[in-house]
Image: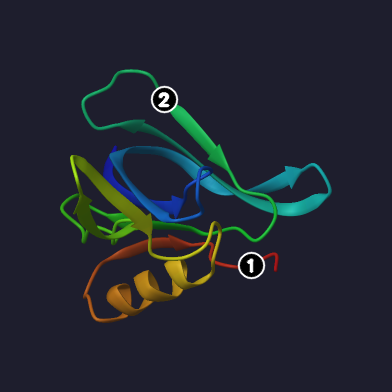
């Protein structure tokens, strides 16, 4: 089994999230109205049960060999204190494509061994 790092978009804000684990299977298959929706099945690092992602509309799924790949930037910008409260704002609006654009720039500067790239294949 192969150690992998998986990058995909969050279902919460659309920012890029990173998962590390052991690859079981990946590819494309029919899902809802999509003929070639990308999917990945893997066992997360430190876990025993496999999980599966399948991406339909506007997919963003990248699989790299090995662990210790770059961390995606957080979804929050700088925080500031107002009285006794710490206030954080997101960098961009929910599901803004700039999250992916910023991370793609970071990946383009790295020399990683790619297994699969399913970015924007259904757009």
**Residue 83: x, y in percent?**
19, 45
In the displayed structure image, the side of residue 1 where residue 99 appears, left or right:
right
Crowdedness near tag 1: few (<14), some (14–19) or many (≥20) residues, C-alpha within 10 Å: some
Residue furthest right in the image: 33
Q: Residue at the spot x=27%, y=66% of the render?
A: 113
Instruction: First in sequence, mark 2 or 1: give its number.
Output: 2
Q: Nearer the viewer, residue 36 or 80?
A: 80
Q: Nearer the viewer, residue 97 or 18?
A: 97
**Residue 46: x, y in percent?**
21, 25
Res. 121 mark: 1
**Residue 123: x, y in percent?**
70, 69
Rendering quarter of residue 115: bottom left
Q: Secondary structure at mark 1?
A: loop
Instruction: Calculate the distance from the C-alpha at mark 2 to the C-alpha at mark 1.
Output: 25 Å
- Marks 1 and 2: in contact by CB < 8 Å? no
**Residue 31: x, y in percent?**
75, 42
In the displayed structure image, the side of residue 10 where residue 3 appears, left or right:
left
* Residue corresponding to mark 2: 50
Q: Secondary structure at mark 2?
A: loop
Rendering quarter of residue 59: bottom right
């Amino acid at each position: 089994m192969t150690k992998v790092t998986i990058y995909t978009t969050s279902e919460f804000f659309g920012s890029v999230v990173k998962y590390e684990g052991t690859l079981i299977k990946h590819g494309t298959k029919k899902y809802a109205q999509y003929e070639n929706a990308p999917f990945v099945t893997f066992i997360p690092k430190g876990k025993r049960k496999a999980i599966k992602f399948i991406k339909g509309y506007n997919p963003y799924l990248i699989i790299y060999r090995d662990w210790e790949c770059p961390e995606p930037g957080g979804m929050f910008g700088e925080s500031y204190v107002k009285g006794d409260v710490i206030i954080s704002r997101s960098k961009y609006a929910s599901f803004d494509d700039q999250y992916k654009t910023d991370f793609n720039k970071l990946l383009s500067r790295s020399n990683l061994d790619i297994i699969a790239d399913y970015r924007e294949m259904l757009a």
